[in-house]
């Protein structure tokens, strides 16, 4: 149950716990994010050759691929920040750029916290942008600080927080936007390996508590396999899907138990092989 029910929320469709069939294309209103025949270029540079994707409500889908293959461009296209050269994209059934943007919250690699605001005011910024007063926004954000281990740091400035805590605040800001679709672009890429692993475990718990439809772009194979229900592997530019992995559900907790299991190792090997083949 959401801890901020008064925030404007676009309700996702009912979630089915059953796994999607590998390679299945969902072309109707049943997909939270639906992409059909997507092609995109920058001038003469073809970035995405052809891409079809359907993400179910509250499904977490990871996107792996070589650097420069168009992963970040894909998120911008989904969010309506760019329009595709060809093909169709819908978020919650909305195809217009403004409609897609209204249904998406975007989290980039850098936390982009405002240094003059406290942690709670940074997290509540999305609520302020929706017209909430400062006290009301703080009231709605405060329970999440307690739920996700940030209690006591509400009044801290970004410079007083560790890198992992800053990313936690940035993620809470993304959740508090109350959008049904989260677009995460290498959100932990700047963190050290230990902190990154801790953040992955933290986000897994956060998504259990506050489910969202998620498209996660990452270069980290373990991150994708641990956090996601499905993982798509893209080839070198122009991007297309060369492999799709459906991960076991639920993953073992804590994270270390998951990533050291034989099943996880087999998935990691398949993903790495697909990445190597796609990069050629």
Image (cartoon, rainbow, N blue to C red):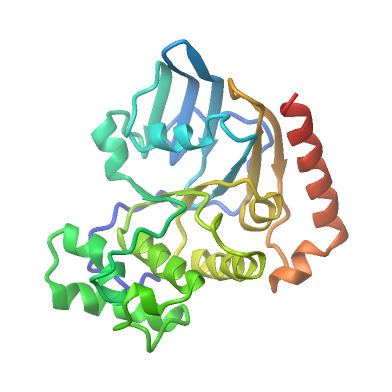
Q: Quadrant of residue 146?
A: bottom left
As rendered, which of 263 and 123 lies closer to the eye? 123
Q: Is 202 situated left or right of 260 in this image? A: left
Residue 1 lies, in percent from the top left, at: 40, 71
Residue 131 lies, in percent from the top left, at: 12, 61
Q: Residue placed farthest to the right in the image?
A: 262
Q: Is 19 situated left or right of 125 in this image? A: right
Give above or below for 122 relative to 229: below
Residue 232 lies, in percent from the top left, at: 64, 37
Q: Residue placed farthest to the bottom in the image?
A: 152
How many marks on residues? 0
Q: Residue at x 46, y 74 (%)?
A: 165
Q: Quadrant of residue 49?
A: top right
Quadrant showing the C terminus: top right
Q: Quadrant of residue 126?
A: bottom left
Give above or below for 279 relative to 261: above
Q: Residue at x 39, y 69 (%)?
A: 169
As rendered, which of 234 and 8 lies closer to the eye? 234
Residue 129 lies, in percent from the top left, at: 18, 58
Q: Residue placed farthest to the top in the image?
A: 44
As rendered, which of 17 and 96 lies closer to the eye? 96
Q: Residue at x 60, y 35 (%)?
A: 67
Q: Residue at x 70, y 74 (%)?
A: 254
Q: Is 227 situated left or right of 129 in this image? A: right
Give above or below for 31 relative to 127: above
Q: Residue placed farthest to the front in the image?
A: 159
């Amino acid at each position: 149950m959401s801890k901020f029910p008064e925030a404007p929320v676009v309700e996702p469709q009912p979630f089915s716990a059953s796994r999607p069939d590998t390679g299945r294309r969902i072309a109707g209103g049943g997909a939270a994010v639906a992409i059909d025949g997507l092609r995109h270029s920058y001038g003469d540079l073809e970035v995405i050759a052809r891409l079809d994707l359907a993400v179910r409500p509250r499904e977490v889908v990871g996107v792996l691929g070589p650097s420069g293959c168009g992963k970040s461009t894909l998120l911008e296209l989904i969010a309506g920040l760019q329009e595709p050269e060809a093909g169709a994209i819908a978020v919650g059934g909305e195809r217009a750029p403004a409609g897609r943007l209204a249904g998406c919250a975007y989290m980039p690699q850098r936390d982009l916290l405002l240094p003059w605001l406290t942690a709670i005011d940074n997290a509540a910024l999305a609520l302020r942008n929706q017209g909430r007063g400062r006290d009301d926004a703080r009231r709605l954000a405060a329970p999440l600080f307690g739920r996700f281990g940030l209690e006591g740091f509400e009044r801290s400035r970004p410079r007083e927080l560790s890198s992992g805590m800053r990313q936690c605040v940035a993620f809470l800001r993304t959740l508090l936007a109350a959008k049904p679709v989260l677009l995460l672009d290498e959100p932990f890429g700047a963190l050290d390996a230990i902190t990154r692993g801790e953040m992955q475990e933290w986000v897994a718990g956060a998504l259990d508590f506050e489910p969202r439809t998620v498209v996660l772009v990452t270069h980290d194979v373990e991150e994708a396999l641990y956090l996601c229900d499905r993982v798509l592997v893209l080839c070198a530019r122009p991007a297309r899907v060369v492999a799709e992995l459906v991960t076991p559900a639920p993953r073992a907790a804590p994270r270390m138990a998951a990533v050291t299991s034989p099943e996880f190792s087999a998935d990691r090997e398949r993903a790495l092989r697909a990445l190597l083949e796609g990069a050629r």
